[in-house]
Every structure is written in structure tokens, then in C-alpha cells.
């Protein structure tokens, strides 16, 4: 298992190095101006500028502005979405009542909620948390619902044969069986949360990664834009890795890790 992870890490590093080399070659070829494709050294310089302070805040100010929204909205989506999805699958009446709401929310692009969030909550933290929460909760609910519905019938029948009650059947059979699917929903939700907070900060925000991208665009500083995008990718990858670590501890029986 550890060897497979090292091989995967090697592929990751090799792919990233190849992309970095291709980027450097394209920027150095003279076919693109620095405004269109900033060279890697300009992007590294932009990191230094943001570290020293850019548009009223240093890198930690912008990181925390985005990260706190992501953490709050993701936590709310997990605390509400997982129980809701499980109850929708386990109790028919809850599913009948809540399914239309989820069906309505699913096709609406999360950025479409931004104007309404500004009207309802203003441009502060609550509005951005609301938009990200709406984006994050849908995959959590859907995957939690599917996790319970896809519990192998033979497991449920075997537990019933042994006299297991309905509550124990949920917590001791259905939930452990469905945890891998639930965790997959959480990882999808985390990615959507990051995409949505950047979109929200592009519209209106005093700080954050999206704020950096928009101000880089307004000031014709493509290196700042690229640096902010790379920063988003790094933080999101680290958070996803942390979630994978938690998943391996919570779901050690998942055959996908074998």
C-alpha cells in the first residue's frame, strides 16, 4: 500500500514538473507576451509582492479571508447535509418532502445565488458563507442518500435475521457500509466550496484569493492572477489530502485503498 502511494506521488511530481517545464518553454518562446502568459519567475515575484502586502493585506490576510468562509460553509454542509441525506434515504416521508427541494437546488449554478446573497446578507461574511453552503450541501446530501440506499440487501437481511432493530440496523450496518460514498461526497463538496468562494470574491470582497484575481485583472497584472490561482490549488490540494487522511482512518475497510 505504501509503495503504491509513493508511486502515485512520483507520478504527481513528474506531471507537475512536466507542466512547469512546458509553461516555462511557452513563456520563453516569445510567442506570448507576459501580460498573456506570465513566465514562472514573474509569478514567483508576485508571491513575494503579496507576502509583503498587496491591496491592503498580506498573504495571510487573503488566505484567511477565503479559508474561513470555506471552513464555515463546508462544516455547515457536513453537519446538516449528512444527517439530512441519511434521513431522506431511511425514512420515506422525509425523502418525499425534501427530494423536491434538492431537485430544485441541483441545477442552479452556485454563482447565481451571489446577487441574492448580497441583497439578503450584504457583502460581509454571512453572504459568502450562504453562497458556499448552498453549493456544498447538495453533493453531501445526494451522496449520503445514495450511500444508505445502496446498502447491500444481503447485509440488511442478515442483520434482520439476527434480530437487529431498525435503529441499530442504520448505525451498525447501513452507515458503515455507506461511509466510503459519504466521504466521496465530502470531497466533491470541498472542491465546489473552493470554486464558489472564488466566484463570490470575484464579485465583491475586501480580501481573499478571488479578490486578488479580480484586482490582478483590473490592474493588468497577470502574474498576480496566476499566483492567486496557484495558491488556491495548493491550499485545496492540502485540504483534500487531509480529508483523504481522515477517510483512511474513518473507513479503514474501504477496498479502494487496498
Image (cartoon, rainbow, N blue to C red):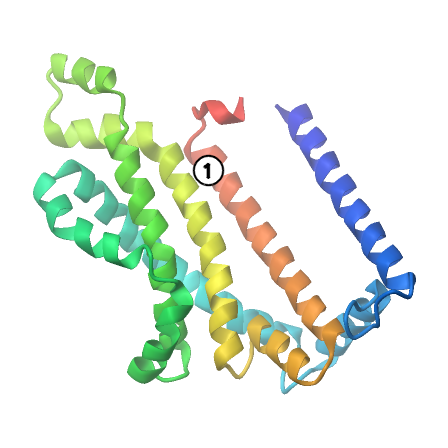
Residue 66 horizontal/vertical position (percent): 52, 69
Identify the residue at horizontal 18%, vertical 43% (top origin): 88
Please give the name of the residue rendered at 48% of the width and 82% of the height, measured from the top-left corner. Answer: 204
Coordinates of residue 122 in the picture (x, y in percent):
36, 84
Pointer 1 local density, CA inside 10 Å: few below 14, some 14–19, many at least 20: some
- Horizontally, residue 116 falls left or right of residue 60, namely left
Q: Name the residue at 75% across, 71% down.
A: 47
Determine whether, in the image, residue 12 is placed left or right of residue 90.
Answer: right
* Element assignment for label 1: helix
Q: Quadrant of the N terminus?
A: top right
Going by the picture, which residue comes out furthest to the front? 31
Q: Which residue is mark 1?
A: 247
**In the displayed structure image, the side of residue 100 where residue 204 appears, left or right:** right
- Relative height, residue 88 to residue 197 (above, below): above
**Percent position (x, y) of residue 69?**
45, 68
Foreground residue among 128 and 167: 128
Image quadrant where residue 175 sits: top left
Percent across and percent down for residue 23 are: 81, 56
Count of picture labels: 1
**Quarter of the rendering containing residue 108:** bottom left
For the point 78% across and 68% down, which residue is it? 43
Above/below status of 79 relative to 124: above
* Residue farthest to the left, as pictured: 93
Amino acid at each position: 500500500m505504501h509503495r503504491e502511494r509513493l508511486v502515485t506521488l512520483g507520478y504527481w511530481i513528474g506531471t507537475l514538473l512536466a507542466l512547469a517545464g512546458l509553461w516555462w518553454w511557452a513563456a520563453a518562446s516569445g510567442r506570448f507576451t507576459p501580460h498573456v502568459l506570465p513566465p514562472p519567475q514573474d509569478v514567483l515575484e508576485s508571491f513575494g509582492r503579496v507576502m509583503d502586502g498587496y491591496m491592503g493585506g498580506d498573504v495571510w490576510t487573503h488566505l484567511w479571508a477565503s479559508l474561513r468562509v470555506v471552513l464555515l460553509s463546508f462544516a455547515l454542509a457536513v453537519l446538516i447535509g449528512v444527517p439530512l441525506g441519511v434521513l431522506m434515504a431511511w425514512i420515506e416521508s422525509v425523502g418525499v418532502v425534501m427530494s423536491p427541494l434538492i431537485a430544485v437546488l441541483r441545477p442552479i449554478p452556485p454563482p447565481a445565488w451571489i446577487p441574492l446573497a448580497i441583497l439578503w446578507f450584504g457583502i460581509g461574511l454571512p453572504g459568502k458563507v450562504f453562497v458556499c453552503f448552498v453549493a456544498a450541501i447538495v453533493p453531501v446530501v445526494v451522496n449520503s442518500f445514495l450511500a444508505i440506499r445502496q446498502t447491500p440487501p444481503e447485509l440488511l437481511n442478515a442483520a434482520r435475521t439476527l434480530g437487529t432493530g431498525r435503529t441499530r440496523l442504520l448505525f451498525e450496518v447501513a452507515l458503515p457500509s455507506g461511509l466510503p460514498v459519504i466521504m466521496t461526497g465530502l470531497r466533491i463538496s470541498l472542491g465546489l466550496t473552493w470554486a464558489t468562494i472564488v466566484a463570490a470574491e470575484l464579485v465583491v470582497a475586501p480580501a481573499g484569493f478571488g479578490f486578488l484575481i479580480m484586482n490582478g485583472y483590473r490592474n493588468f497584472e497577470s502574474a498576480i492572477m496566476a499566483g492567486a490561482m496557484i495558491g488556491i490549488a495548493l491550499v485545496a490540494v492540502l485540504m483534500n489530502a487531509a480529508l483523504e487522511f481522515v477517510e483512511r482512518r474513518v473507513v479503514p475497510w474501504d477496498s479502494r485503498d487496498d
